[in-house]
Image: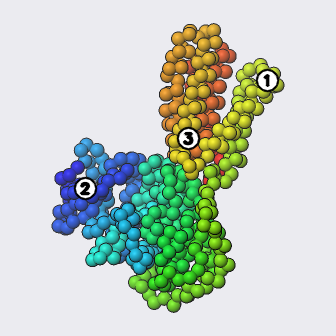
């Protein structure tokens, strides 16, 4: 792509970075004779015609954000590169480096982190007043520049929303919006309406990482997301004693699970950052979710942008409250030296209820099939359905998010086991069914597992895209749908009134329908 000229104006000179959606290039604007940064989106649903229109609309909205702490959008467009249509954003070129390089290699002083936090808050405040929520605040989306690398700019405003509305989901996995280590609980739950307090939670994760040298929650994939919902991070001062108590408490308040218990605005966070003393100060470590702090006022966050933009060029502020009131809270009892830190729950709250719901839906559908399509006595149908209910409930509960393992891998294993079970059922049926020659059972045994497994992955991805539920929920619905579809196809074929091909088609439709309906009935977590 080097040397390509977009819209006869922007010549790509040097690739600065690459990600799942495309690449960022240093380019030359030949019309204005200046260096710019160009984000080229090369793949994914954003390159469809409908999403391209949404891209242009969102780019225009983002371009109206003008603030010293926000990377300016100059232009946007669509061009053909190497025979493929691409979308691109032309942005201000910031001569610096990503904040991610700092978090990966060095730990900054408390004073530097506070100064950076104030600048990020200034940019977020301007965006939130304009009704724009970033949705993906993280070190990689903050550029640091200038002498001594004291200044910064926030980039990629609007990109996360574009990805969300296109339905591609979680950065790098295709499931949900944002980057796992920095996602707010409301993002994890899949809430479609987010406000600025979601960005403030992500800011808390970023500040925590800058100060502690690691994010508040670590792990693989959905394990991290489960911790955002239920976990309690280590207090900052237990990892870094020189962090002032006021700053520790502020970060803890930003990481509260309930948005109503966080600071309401970026301006409020700025005011509290300005009140952070130079020394460590007094007071117990801040632990979000354990207690409320008397010095952290909470108000309802605005649901709509204010009537007009206001200048935010460091207006005079009321003198901040001293850090002493924070010490008035009832101190947390110090733990014994050997006491381990609290463990994060293995599964999300309500997983047992949802597992019972999945099992009940599965068993009810099987009962209906046997009652309508066979002449079995009710006692035999009951004898079959009771163990199916127990096994289905256990399988669904085991598949719920587990912080000790990669949950995507867990759901894949569940899909594989269900594919094996259904293949065995189909092979036995074909072997015992008189009209079927023996080789059909052998063919089913050889091809059944890969066909059903990869078909199940496709069905699950489709359900995730349509309903935006957690992977373990869509996986549970999909695997139970596969079981019901297999039984339906077998019963229809055995009845003799429907051809084998129509029986298989009916089973596939039942599979997809059951997956959608059962997943839809599960609450968002």
Q: Which residue is mark 1?
A: 380
* Lateral position of residue 191 relative to residue 87, left or right: right
How many numbered circles are shown? 3
Q: Are marks 3 and 1 in contact (CB under 8 Å)?
A: no
Mark 2 and mark 3: Cα distance apart in space:
37 Å
In percent of the image, x 63 and y 35: which residue is there? 480
Q: N-terminal of the two: label 3 or label 1?
A: 1
Disc on res. 411: 3
Helix, strand or loop under label 3: helix
Disc on res. 15: 2
Mark 1 and mark 2: Cα distance apart in space:
67 Å
Is residue 129 visible from the viewing direction of this image?
no
Disc on res. 96: none
Q: N-terminal of the two: label 2 or label 3?
A: 2
Q: Please tell me which residue lies in front, 155 or 343.
A: 343
Q: Which quarter of the picture shows residue 482? A: top right
Position of residue 99 measured from the top left corner of the image (x, y, whole percent): 36, 66
Q: Is residue 389 above or below residue 503?
A: below
Mark 3 and mark 1: Cα distance apart in space:
31 Å
In percent of the image, x 66 and y 43: which residue is there? 397
Q: Which quarter of the picture shows residue 500? A: top right
Q: Please tell me which residue lies in front, 402 or 456.
A: 402
Q: Is residue 511 above or below residue 342?
A: above
Q: Which quarter of the picture shows residue 225? A: bottom right
In percent of the image, x 54 and y 37: which residue is there? 413
Of circles 2 and 3, which is in front?
3
């Amino acid at each position: 792509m080097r040397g390509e000229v977009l819209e006869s104006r922007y010549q790509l000179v040097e690739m600065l970075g690459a990600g799942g959606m495309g690449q960022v290039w240093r380019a030359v604007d030949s019309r204005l004779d200046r260096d710019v940064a160009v984000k080229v989106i090369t793949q994914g649903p954003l390159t469809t015609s409908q999403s391209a229109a949404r891209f242009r609309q969102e780019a225009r909205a983002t371009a109206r954000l003008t603030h010293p702490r926000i990377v300016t959008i100059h232009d946007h467009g669509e061009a053909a590169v190497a025979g493929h249509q691409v979308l691109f954003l032309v942005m201000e070129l910031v001569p610096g480096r990503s904040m991610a390089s700092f978090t990966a290699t060095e730990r900054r002083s408390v004073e530097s982190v506070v100064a950076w936090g104030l600048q990020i808050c200034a940019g977020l405040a301007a965006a939130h007043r304009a009704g724009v929520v970033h949705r993906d605040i993280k070190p990689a989306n903050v550029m640091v520049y200038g002498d001594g690398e004291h200044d910064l700019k926030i980039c990629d405003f609007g990109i996360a929303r574009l990805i969300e509305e296109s339905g591609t989901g979680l950065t790098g996995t295709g499931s949900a919006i944002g980057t796992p280590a920095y996602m707010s609980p409301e993002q994890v739950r899949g809430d479609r309406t987010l406000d600025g307090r979601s960005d403030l939670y992500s800011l808390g994760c970023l500040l925590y990482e800058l100060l502690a040298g690691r994010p508040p929650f670590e792990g693989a994939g959905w394990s991290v997301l489960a911790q955002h919902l239920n976990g309690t991070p280590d207090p900052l001062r237990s990892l870094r004693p020189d962090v002032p108590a006021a700053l520790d408490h502020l970060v803890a308040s930003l990481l509260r699970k309930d948005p109503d218990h966080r600071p309401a605005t970026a301006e409020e966070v700025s005011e509290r950052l300005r009140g952070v003393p130079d020394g460590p100060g007094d007071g117990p470590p801040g632990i979000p979710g354990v207690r409320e702090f008397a010095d952290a006022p909470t108000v309802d966050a605005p649901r709509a942008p204010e009537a007009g933009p206001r200048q935010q060029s460091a207006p005079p502020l009321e003198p901040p409250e001293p850090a002493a009131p924070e010490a008035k809270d009832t101190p947390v009892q110090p733990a014994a030296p050997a006491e381990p830190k609290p463990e994060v729950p293995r599964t999300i709250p309500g997983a047992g209820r949802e597992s019972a719901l999945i099992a009940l839906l599965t068993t009810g559908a099987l009962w209906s099939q046997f009652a309508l399509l066979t002449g079995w006595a009710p006692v035999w149908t009951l004898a079959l359905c009771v163990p199916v209910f127990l096994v289905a409930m256990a399988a669904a509960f085991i598949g719920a998010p587990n912080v000790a393992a990669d949950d995507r891998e867990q759901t894949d294993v569940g899909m594989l086991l269900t594919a094996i079970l259904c293949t065995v059922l189909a092979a036995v049926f074909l072997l015992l069914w008189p009209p079927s020659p023996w080789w059909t059972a052998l063919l089913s045994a050889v091809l059944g597992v890969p066909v059903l497994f990869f078909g199940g992955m496709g069905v699950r991805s489709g359900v995730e895209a349509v309903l935006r539920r957690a992977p373990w929920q869509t996986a549970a619905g999909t695997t139970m749908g596969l079981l019901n579809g297999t039984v339906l196809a077998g019963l229809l074929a055995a009845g003799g009134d429907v051809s084998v091909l129509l029986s298989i088609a009916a089973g596939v439709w039942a599979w997809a329908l059951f997956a959608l309906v059962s997943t839809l009935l599960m609450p968002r977590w």
